[in-house]
């Protein structure tokens, strides 16, 4: 198997997750890690056996030994790094959002097309085995005509006004938070499964905590209003904590979803239901090894994650026998498996459409998010 050399930029939560997934697919050598925190970069590099460490991401991008750049940085760096990697002739695997704006992501799509590099966005939830099974069932018309798509993506990690993270700072994360951060995953999933594109939205967003207590030492992007005895400062929040979005698809299909980062007890509950004329499907990310199948005239079913029970085209994404759960780390593993096989076979994404999410998908998600923000301002339906 031809070995492909990768470099990872960013050493927060998701950078090491990329490294762990790459280690499990085989045929990939991580040769470089970059972070402004050199000590952190060294610690990650030593853990994964990467021989080179860079404090400046530009040095990694221009390293002639790097074939693929994994961009695992905060949102505000995605455009600059992705663009530089493309111009350096590197294949790119980017975290989402692809960029902070659709204008920027449109530039990346054009550059990727021009330079013929392989490009991917880490919408990893597509690659759970039972998500692939759900898509296959829709493609086989097992659900019949689809009547409705609905669901939610709920978290509680920003439940208290004292909860704070860089994602709350719009200069770093973008004008949308809950919708862009987790709602985009939900939209990507339902479009992937149904094969239909979201084309119109009607949104109602809410910022529950209009001010939060920011600890000292975080990035200074908000005007200081008030300092407490504990050293925290009062920071104004200009992105949404939650929202409800009605959606329409290209074929007239209707749907609705709720997104929230302030729902107590919900750690990462991404749930959807797709209702068809023959049966319905439902799936919950917190219980990813079961797929609910609903019927009107006979008992409902639960499909468990078992390669022997899945469609033949789906089995490659289920790596362990039935009764052996697979979960979050296996999504990026399966995605990267497809990306690196595409590279290894020398395929050109301009000629062969990849099965994995590309910059085109990342660009469309940006357009959806911007339409949601516009709809919330105008209080009306907005075309994507």
Image (cartoon, rainbow, N blue to C red):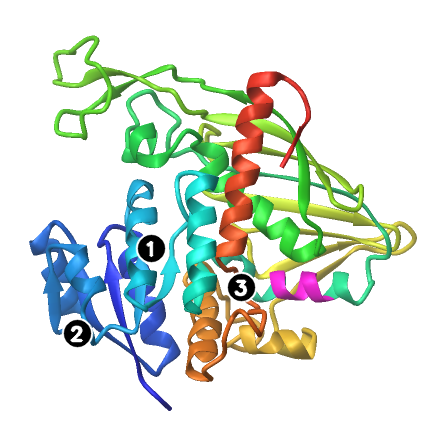
Q: Residue at point 68% right, 40% down?
A: 199
Residue 243 in picture, x, y percent from top left: 55, 26
Residue denoted by label 3: 127
| Secondary structure of residue under mark 1 | helix
| Secondary structure of residue under mark 3 | helix
Q: CA distance from mark 2 to mark 1?
A: 24 Å
N-term-proximal mark, 1 vs 3: 1
Magenta part of the chain = 131-136
Q: Residue reaching furthest left?
A: 39
Magenta-colored stretch includes residue 134: yes
Q: CA distance from mark 1 to mark 3?
A: 23 Å
- Split into 4 quadrants, where in the image is the N terminus? bottom left
N-term-proximal mark, 3 vs 2: 2
Residue denoted by label 1: 82
Which residue is at the front of the view, 283 or 90? 90
Residue 261 in picture, x, y percent from top left: 45, 32
Disc 1 crowd rating (10 Å Cα; few below 14, some 14-19, many 20+) is many
| Secondary structure of residue under mark 2 | loop
């Amino acid at each position: 198997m031809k070995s492909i050399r990768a470099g990872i930029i960013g050493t927060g939560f998701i950078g090491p997750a990329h490294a762990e997934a790459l280690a499990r697919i085989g045929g990939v050598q991580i040769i470089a890690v970059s972070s402004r925190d050199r000590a952190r970069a060294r610690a990650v590099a030593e853990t994964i056996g990467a021989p080179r460490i860079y404090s400046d991401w530009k040095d990694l991008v221009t390293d002639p030994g790097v074939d693929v750049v994994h961009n695992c940085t905060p949102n505000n760096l995605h455009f600059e790094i992705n663009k530089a990697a493309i111009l350096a002739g590197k294949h790119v695997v980017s975290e989402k959002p692809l960029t902070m704006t659709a204008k920027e992501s449109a530039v990346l799509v054009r550059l990727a097309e021009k330079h013929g590099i392989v490009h991917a966005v880490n919408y990893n939830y597509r690659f759970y085995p039972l998500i692939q099974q759900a898509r296959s069932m829709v493609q086989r018309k097992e659900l019949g005509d689809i009547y409705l798509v609905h669901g939610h993506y709920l978290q509680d990690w920003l439940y208290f006004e004292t909860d704070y993270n860089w994602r709350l700072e719009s200069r770093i994360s973008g004008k949308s938070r809950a919708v862009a951060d987790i709602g985009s995953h939900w939209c990507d999933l339902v479009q992937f499964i149904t094969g239909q594109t979201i084309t119109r939205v009607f949104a109602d967003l809410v910022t529950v905590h209009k001010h939060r207590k920011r600890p000292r030492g975080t990035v200074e992007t908000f005007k200081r209003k008030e300092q407490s005895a504990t050293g925290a400062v009062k920071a104004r929040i200009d992105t949404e904590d939650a929202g409800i979005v009605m959606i329409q698809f290209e074929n007239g299909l209707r749907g609705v979803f709720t997104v929230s980062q302030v729902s107590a007890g919900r750690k990462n509950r991404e749930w959807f239901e797709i209702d068809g004329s023959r049966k319905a499907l439902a799936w919950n990310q917190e219980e990813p090894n079961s797929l609910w199948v609903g019927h009107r005239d006979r008992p409902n079913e639960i499909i468990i994650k078992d390669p022997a029970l899945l469609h033949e085209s789906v089995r490659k994404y289920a790596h362990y026998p039935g009764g052996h759960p697979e979960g979050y780390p296996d999504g990026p593993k399966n995605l990267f498996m497809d990306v690196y096989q595409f590279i290894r076979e020398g395929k050109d994404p301009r000629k062969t459409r990849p099965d994995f999410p590309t910059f085109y998908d990342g660009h469309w998600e940006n357009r959806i998010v911007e339409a949601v923000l516009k709809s919330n301002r105008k209080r009306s339906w907005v075309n994507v």
